[in-house]
Amino acid sequence: MEEFVWTDAHIRWMSDASKKSKFYYWIAERIAAYLPPTSRVFNCGGGLGDLAIWLSYHVEEVTVIENDPKAVAALRTRCPQNVVAILGDVHTYAPDKLYDSLVLFDVGGAEETLPVVRELSRTKTFVLADINTAAGEADLRELKETLNNAGIPFNYEAFDQEHVQPFRSREDARSYFLFSLNRQLTEEELDHLLSESDDPELPYTLVEQKKIGMIVFDAANPALKKPIL
């Protein structure tokens, strides 16, 4: 899986989205339905902590890990008391004890996720990906096949969730699309994609329906105690 590289622009876009979008709120609601309120949850791949923050209303504690100092600093400015932000690499992180639950979002397929599951989670594990993308769909398909082959039961949900991305200007939007689509959009294309808002700070928005896949399985399954790849 190609490693995500944080920039100041990414942090600004994600921070602005947290003001307007309930994307992670609704995903947290889905995850929380599986968890008791006493859970200690570990979250990897949750952006700037939006998912962790919304989960923190449902569980005892959420720990988030990121390997970029700027992203962690931005996350810590927003953390409630029961959200812990760690600077580090999820693949080398060694907790004092296993977490009750593990949430992995866009982290990769079986090869990337299962070693993390063995090291961090003792019960419920949630692996989510954006299945509008070929990479996300392939990652979840590979994980489902691996779990099936190992005889590990799992639940799978696919659902549509609205995501709102606001922009501070048309130039800001143009930079976002250059990053996400790897090309400059014409004025006509921008007009088609953007809606105007009554917020003078964030006057333009992009509203998308993202299709999310979520695999839920139990990390306590004995088959996971050894490599199954």
Image (cartoon, rainbow, N blue to C red):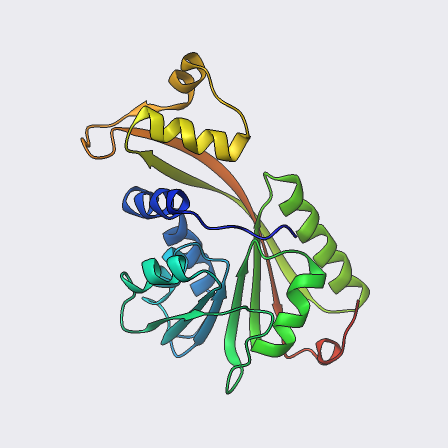
Q: In the displayed structure, does residue 130 sit left or right of residue 17? A: right
Count up the numbered dots: 0
Q: Is residue 106 above or below residue 56?
A: above
Residue depicted at 38% across the width and 29% down the height: 173
Residue depicted at 45% across the width and 16% down the height: 189
User: For the C terminus, which image quadrant?
Assistant: bottom right
Residue depicted at 41% across the width and 19% down the height: 190
Q: In the displayed structure, does residue 212 sit left or right of residue 149? A: left
Residue in front for this viewpoint, 218 or 17? 17
Q: Position of residue 97 (x, y in %)?
A: 52, 86
State which quadrant residue 64 falls in: bottom left
Q: In the displayed structure, does residue 210 sit left or right of residue 13? A: right
Residue in front for this viewpoint, 120 or 176? 176
Q: Is residue 4 above or below residue 132?
A: below
Q: Position of residue 4 (x, y in %)?
A: 54, 51
Residue depicted at 73% across the width and 69% down the height: 152
State which quadrant residue 203 falls in: top left
